[in-house]
Every structure is written in C-alpha cells, then in structure tokens.
Amino acid sequence: MFHTIIIVGNVGRDPEMRYTPSGAAVTSFSVATSRNYNSQGQNVKETIWFRVSCWGRQAEIANTYVKKGQKILVEGRLVADPSGNPRIYTRSDGTAASSFEISATNLKMLSSRSENEGGGYNNNYGQSNGSAGTAYMGSDMGPGGNYDMDGETEDIPF
C-alpha cells in the first residue's frame, strides 16, 4: 500500500537540525495551512498545523534554506502513532490535542527573495528574473527542477 500527502503553507518556526545516534541528519519544522470559507454568513478561517521532518541531505538543505514565514510545498507521508491515528498528547494547560506529522520526501520553496529576505530561490533554470521556487526532491534532477537528495553530491544544486 502507498499513501502521500501534499501541503502548501507557511513555515511556522525555523528548522531545528539534530543527528540520530547512527549519525543521520534530521531536520524538523512546522507548517501552517489555512483556508477561508463562508459558514452561515460568517467568514471562517481554518488553520491546520503540521510537523515536518526531513532526513539525510534533504535535512541539511532544509536546515540551511527554510526560514520561518516562508511559503513552502511539502510532499511526503503521514506519520501515525502505533494504532494508525494522529499522535495524541496533552497540552501544558491540560487539554487534549493531536499532531499531524509528515515525513517529507519533497520540498519546494515558494517564497521569493523579496517576500522573505534571502528565503526564496530562482526556479527559472538559467534565467535570472528572480522568481521563486526551487525544488528539493527525492527523485533525479529533471525538467521540473527536481534534485536528487539521496545522491552523493557535495554541492548544493543551485
């Protein structure tokens, strides 16, 4: 079986990188997605928070280039508790809450440099008009700007 989730939202906090005991890099950050809709004549804004984890080379790149407030696309798989549900925890005020977690396989920064000082990247493959969006993905480099995150390259692919 296979599942994937794609979200687009704003980074809620700067990434935090750490290493597992075996030496693998792991970077975590949060992303808020929101939608507006009208319910019984009232405008309603709904926000859902996701915790995102990146591994290996992708973790190192995310730690360097992902910044709080930046627009980002995340593709990955949901991480559930052992029973297959969202992780349930108790907040500091004693109320129950759940956490949606994504193990990222692909990231794409969507903010331009002017929207986030230093937070956007050129996605025009050689053109230099400063528009946003560089993809950091787990597949081979292709015409869509996908970069191999599992490869042994030493240089950042832009």
Image: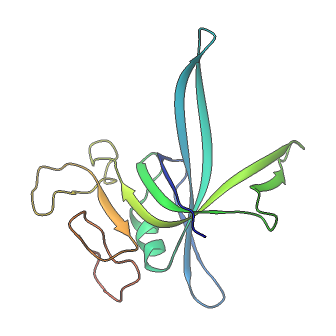
**Percent of width and height locating residue 147:** 31, 73
- Residue at (10% x, 55% y) in the render: 128
136 left or right of 80 in image? left
- Residue at (28% x, 81% y) in the render: 155
On screen, residue 128 above or below 60: above
Q: Quadrant of residue 121?
A: bottom left
User: Where's the N terminus, which quadrant?
Assistant: bottom right
Pick out the residue farthest to the top. 41
- Residue at (56% x, 85% y) in the render: 24
Pick out the residue farthest to the front. 1
- Residue nearest the viewer, comparing 124 with 28: 124
62 left or right of 139 in image? right
- Residue nearest the viewer, comparing 150 with 118: 150
**Percent of width and height locating residue 4:** 53, 61
On screen, residue 100 above or below 45: below
93 left or right of 141 in image? right
**Percent of width and height locating residue 107:** 42, 61
